[in-house]
Image: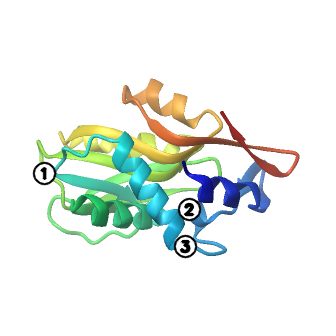
Amino acid sequence: MLENIKKSLLEAPVIKKRDYDYFVHPITDGIPLVTAEIMEEVAEAIAQHADTNVDKIVCVEAMGIHIATALSIKTRLPFVVVRKRQYGLEGEVDVHQVTGYSHGNLYINGLKKGERVMLVDDVVSTGGTMTAVLNALKALEVDVVDVLAVMEKGKGKEVVEESTGFKVKTLLKVNVKDGKVEIED
């Protein structure tokens, strides 16, 4: 399972962003090429591991969008994008996020109190974005049924779980060692 993703991860280039080893991959960056095979693998694996008895899928711009799109097509569920741009719509929620390589505000629209949602994202590495979004969803009194990232890197999953109380499911655990991506069992 996930053979196309695993193969592409092992070939992924690694760059340094300050003190952070950042791997460049189709799922996390849309580079070099996002193939239908990889997206089908992701959608199928998430659908198998996640509770899809929800009203909506929630994803984070930008790299959660293609994951939510593939999952939406597979499950026939609508999705909401947590955006980096403010629209000023009624009920919009402002979320401040800090990661290992950036910080900024995110904006949530299109969710109502009591709705059942699943949060999906490309990778949880520092946990900053996912923690901020989950705390905002809690404040909105949205029922977060499931949380899933395609990949985990570093201690971000544990950070999210400890700080929010939500269990985070991931499909793959990866790390960077000596400038190469390694997939952990």
Q: Residues within 10 Å of mark 1 (few under 14, many from 20)?
A: few
| 4 vs 125: above or below | below
Q: Residues within 10 Å of mark 2 (few under 14, many from 20)?
A: many
| 104 vs 168: above or below | below
The tag earlier along the polypeptide, 2 or 3, is 2
Image disc number at residue 112: 1
Callout 1: SS: loop
Residue 79 makes an appearance in the image: yes
User: Mark 3 sits on what residue?
Assistant: 35
Residue 18, picture quadrant: bottom right
From the top left corner, tell me how far across and down residue 151 is, in percent.
56, 46
Callout 3: SS: loop
> Which amino acid lies under the numbered mark 3 shown in the image of this protein?
Thr
Q: Is 137 left, or right, of 63 in this rendering?
A: left
Q: Residue at x 65, y 33 (%)?
A: 185
Query: Comparing marks 1 and 3, which lies closer to the viewer?
Result: 3
User: Which residue is at the far right?
Assistant: 178
Q: Is 119 left, or right, of 171 in this rendering?
A: left
